[in-house]
Amino acid sequence: MGIENIVEKRLGYVFSENGVYEPDEIVFTVELGARVEIGDIVCIEHPSKPGAPVFYQVFEVPLRRKARDYEEDLVRAGNPLIDESRNYPRARAKQIGYIEDVGKLLSGKVTADELLMLIEHVKPLSEVYAPKHEVIEKLLEPSAPSVEVGSIYPSWKHKLKLELPKLLRQGLLIVGGVGTGKTTTMLTLLIRIIRKIRELGGTPHILVIDKDGEYGSQELREAAGGKGNYTRIHVDEIDVLEFMSRDEYLRELLVNLGYYDRRTKAAKAIEVAV
């Protein structure tokens, strides 16, 4: 399958002002009439494997303008010279990886987890393309059971999904200013995780440490399956010993029982039993 079959349009050409071309990050000049935004996924053709797309994600969209010495004087005088022909929109993008057989990606036989990294030179003036919608969808499709979180900016066309195994085993950090929706996002995520686990035939067990009482929503209680499956424990009702490490707990227990020397037979017997 040729690269022309998986792209919508050309966006520009790889062009480095300093003459250096690296595979991990590309800079390209945007064609007249084309539009590129931060977050967009673009691709070029692999330099030595025809038809294989190398995917990149845009992280900067600087504008280069050919300046003249007199321009600042005109600006100071309040009479700037507006000349759009001297503006050169550019974009910087970081590599995601490449896949040799796009047909297998589109058919679901391979996933984005199997992307390879380009480790050879990028050809100067390589054409930069916007991949078709379905290609990006497959590129973003998780390879394991997942929950949908929202839509990806800036196009809002693609859904953001998080894989359950990675989410539950590795963790997630949600950051933002006051009032930006951190709690709402987390509540939505918790509810969808519970529903997905039930859908898969499992029984979800989730502990929420909530110092401000923000997670006592009716929706979360309903998702948990009602009163019997949702328990709210006040912090004052928690025995501190329950949350000690085993060694700390054992030390405290032995002291309370009157065994100050852990080398005694009785202390060792208790240690084995705990």
Image (cartoon, rainbow, N blue to C red):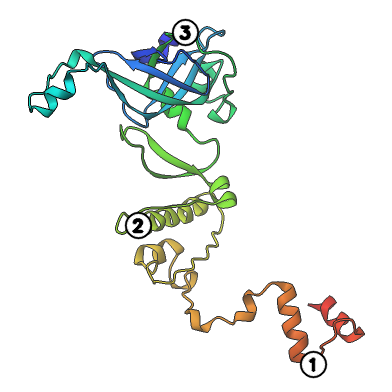
Query: Which quadrant of the view contains residue 85?
Result: top left
- Tell me the distance, in whole angstroms, between the alpha carbons under discs 2 and 1: 50 Å
Which SS class for mark 2?
A: helix
Query: Which quadrant of the view contains residue 116?
Result: top right
Q: Which of the pair 222/17 is nearer the observer?
A: 17
Quarter holding the C terminus is bottom right
Pick whichever of labels 1 and 3 is earlier in the sequence.
Answer: 3
Identify which residue is drawn at 69% across, 72% down: 245
Which SS class for mark 1?
A: loop
Q: Which residue is mark 2?
A: 184
Identify which residue is drawn at 52% across, 18% down: 22
Q: Which residue is mark 3?
A: 2
Q: Which residue is mark 1?
A: 258
Circle 1/circle 3 CB separation < 8 Å: no
- Residue furthest out toward the right: 265
| Rendered location of residue 101, percent (x, y) | 55, 15
Q: Is residue 110 left or right of residue 260?
A: left
Pick whichever of labels 2 and 1 is earlier in the sequence.
Answer: 2
| Rendered location of residue 160, percent (x, y) | 41, 39
- Tell me the distance, in whole angstroms, between the alpha carbons under discs 1 and 3: 79 Å
